[in-house]
Amino acid sequence: MQNCIIQKIVDALSGVIAKVINKELPKTLGKMIDGSVQNLNKDLLDEEHNPLAFAVALAKGAAVNLTMTQAPDLSTQDLVKIYFNGLILENNKTYENV
């Protein structure tokens, strides 16, 4: 710290800061990650009933479904091929993107 007063405060609280970083932060991050995974699992289960579960807006009233149809292809150097569903959703109607 450039300010000596702030540095003294940090030095005095270094044990508490270390405890938060080493013990509390992993617990909090673990809960956040678990929550994100549970939300993703819920969306995956709901996709059959909700075609907009993985839709990303393109324009007013239109979206594209970004679910992948197969795993990314990493066989070409410096190129990753990603295969998206390709359905264009417009006003809750689906159209195949050809």
Image (cartoon, rainbow, N blue to C red):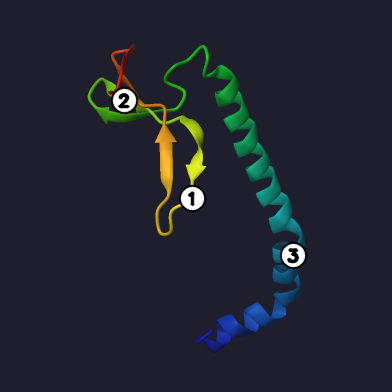
Residue at disc 3, secondary structure: helix
Tag 2 near tag 3, CB within 8 Å: no
Q: In front: mark 1 or mark 3? A: 1
Residue 74's disc is: 1
**In which quarter of the view is residue 59 placed?**
top left
Q: Earlier in the sequence, mark 2 or mark 1?
A: 2
Label 1 is placed on what type of residue? Leu
**Percent coordinates x, y for residue 10 in the rendering:** 64, 78
Position of residue 6 relative to residue 83, above or below, is: below
**Percent coordinates x, y for residue 65 in the rendering:** 39, 26
Label 3 is placed on what type of residue? Asn
Q: Which residue is mark 2?
A: 63
Quadrant including the C terminus:
top left
Q: Earlier in the sequence, mark 2 or mark 3?
A: 3
Label 2 is placed on what type of residue? Ala
Residue at disc 1, secondary structure: loop
Residue 22's disc is: 3
Q: CA distance from mark 2 to mark 1?
A: 27 Å
Q: CA distance from mark 2 to mark 3?
A: 43 Å
